Amino acid sequence: MIVVAGAYVYHRATAGRPYDPPPLAFRGPSDQLRRTVVVPTLDSPIGERTSAIWCGSFQIAWNRLRDDVAKGPIKLDGAQVVADRLNRADLSEDDLAPGSAFAAAGWAADGVAGRIQAEMARRFPDAPRPDFDVDPTGAVAYAYLEASAKFDLPFFDSDDPLQFTDSKGDATAVGAFGIRKKDEYAYDRLREQVHVLFADREKVMKDPKGAEFVLDPCKTSQPYQIVLARVARQATLADTIAQVEQKIAANARVDPYLTSLQPLDTLLVPNLAFEISHRFREVEGADKRFSNPGLRGQYLAAAMQTIRFRLDRSGVELSSESKVYVKPAASHFHFDRPFLVYLKKRGGGRPVFSMWVENAELLDRK
């Protein structure tokens, strides 16, 4: 009997003193969601009109199970397709900022559960203590991931709801943050922190509903970078991220003027806040037994992950003001259509969290 547990705690975009953030849009098990799925790997297929979430903590736990317990690629009768995806996934602990994660695996008889609990208490004293209910002859694989991307300056909460339109054409009023139209003449430092990674400015101005664009809301955030992309959805999160990275690379030599938020530009991003507990039932259960030597006949009794995620304006509004030269044209970077958000170590590395927001199920409804 083997238990795999993974947890990802809040991504917080914080700045200034703490403030009261928007409430969680959802808290509970994933089987209560109707239009959102949690996938085990970035290359897992995702259905049409469905939001999809992936977090790297489960992959890190699987890596430990593969390397430290199975001593090779995991072989699961009846679930080898998913096991192969997990076996070949590229994410490693090198893609995480130092000190942001802990992973371990081993046999219950060797005291691995106690070692995990002791290390978690030492490294992450504010995190919930993991509780393991595992047979003495079984094994445990566990990973905890904590990631954040601090905004140097907080954005504004939007006074008016953002009308988010899903792929079916259904519009939902949701809470949002960013830079509003009425903020156009001030706060140049807030605009300067936004990096337009990709955009066809002419199309954004002429066809704001159909244009594609990619933004980094705070180009100096450390150690992680947030990428927001309003682009066409691909068959998997991995393919969608690859498309975005290609657009960013192609835009690398664009005039710096075009990669900055201009005085009349606006930016609106839906608030995201949820806590989801998920069971990867596609790899757990007695009907999916290991065929690895040393594990033969055993199975994953539970393959679990908890994802806590928050993206909002965070912090206090600015009190400074400056005058700027105004150009007559404006680009409106509004994430009011399905979009991608992912988090990765700045300067390189693979994503540690990704979500395709297809619908308003996990948005802050107004």
Image (spheres, rainbow, N blue to C red):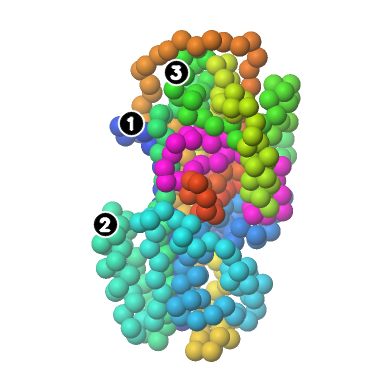
Q: Which of marks 3 and 2 is nearer the N terminus?
A: 2
How crowded pointer 2 is (Cα within 10 Å; few <14, some 14-19, many 20+) is rated as: few
Is 336 situated left or right of 195 in this image? right
Check residue 80 for magenta coloring: no
Q: What residue type is labelled 3?
A: Tyr
> SS class of the residue under badge 1?
loop
Task: Residue at 38% x, 56% y: name it.
Answer: 98
Q: Give the range drawn in magenta.
A: 215-238
Residue 337 visible somewhere in the drawing = no
Numbered label attached to residue 72 = none
Q: Does label 1 or label 2 sit earlier along the sequence?
A: 1
* Residue assigned mark 1: 16
| 288, above or below 216, in the image | below
Q: Callout 3: helix, strand or loop?
A: loop
Q: Which of marks 3 and 2 is in front?
A: 3
Residue named by callout 3? 187
- Judge whether 52 appears above or below 159 on screen: below
Image x and y of residue 93, in percent: 45, 62
Q: Which of 242 and 290 is in front in this view?
A: 242
Measured Cα–Cα span from mark 1 to mark 3: 16 Å
